[in-house]
Image: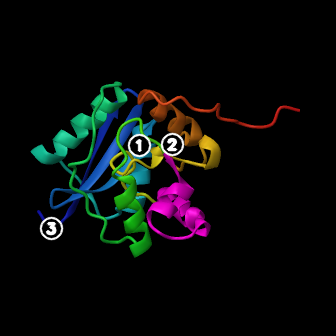
Amino acid sequence: MADNNHYRLFRTAAGIAAIGWHDGRVTVLRLPAPTAPETERALLRRLPDAMRTEPSAEVQAVIDAIVRYFAEEPVDFFDVRVDLVAQPPFFARVYEQVRQLGRGETTTYGAIAHALDVGPEYARAVGQAMAANPVPLIIPCHRVLAAGGAIGGFSAPGGALSKARMLELEGVAIMPVQQGFDF
């Protein structure tokens, strides 16, 4: 059974999350959504051959840390083993850089491009890597902001509001999220 992909749904203070793993390495994390079916569908889109199973002690420890994170406890995910083999090389470099951001530490898409020693035109590619991040929170894409400290996009359930809430959990003062125009 070690050769198969596995997943587990679990409840957090923010909703139902899901984690997928292979050989003890996390391959997919679906941030909390309001319902289990929504979360499960989203995870299975990324990991269609996964079997719902009980997690190993190592994966359960990651689940427990995620639950604590959404309960506003200070936790980090630096030591979580992940498997990102299916990522384009540039995305993998972005993920490695972003993974170094600690709790409450933010940066911008442009600053990540600069840290990777590529031009500012790569800021958009950094944003694309963040949108495709298979393990948000473990690779803390919510800590990467648009220029000027604006929230920017977020592809997890709840969009930019979820990103803002996660930053608030970490004590980051953020600009208000604009939900639309008021005419």
Magenta stretch, main secondary structure class: helix
From mark 2 to mark 3, how far is it between C-alphas? 30 Å
x, y percentage for residue 180?
A: 75, 37
Asked whether, in this view, residue 64 is left or right of residue 109, the answer is: left
Location of residue 58 with respect to 46 vertically, above or below: above
* Mark positioned earlier in the residue sequence (2 or 3): 3
Q: Quadrant of residue 65?
A: top left
The residue that disc 2 covers is 157
Instruction: Report if residue 118 is visible in the image.
Output: yes
The residue that disc 1 covers is 31
x, y percentage for residue 95?
A: 38, 60
Indicate whether residue 80 is drawn in magenta.
no
Q: In the rendered structure, which segment of residues is drawn in magenta?
A: 107-131
From mark 2 to mark 1, how far is it between C-alphas? 7 Å
* Contact, mark 2 vs mark 1 (Cβ under 8 Å): yes
Asked whether, in this view, residue 50 is left or right of residue 43, the answer is: left
Residue found at the very far bottom of the displayed protein: 89
x, y percentage for residue 21?
A: 23, 56
Task: Name the residue located 50 percent from the left edge and 62 percent from the top edge.
Answer: 114
Question: Is 38 in front, or is 158?
Answer: 158
Amino acid identity at mark 1? Leu
Asked whether, in this view, residue 5 is left or right of residue 136, the answer is: left
Question: Is 151 in front, or is 82?
Answer: 151
* Mark positioned earlier in the residue sequence (3 or 1): 3
Instruction: Report if residue 88 is visible in the image.
Output: no
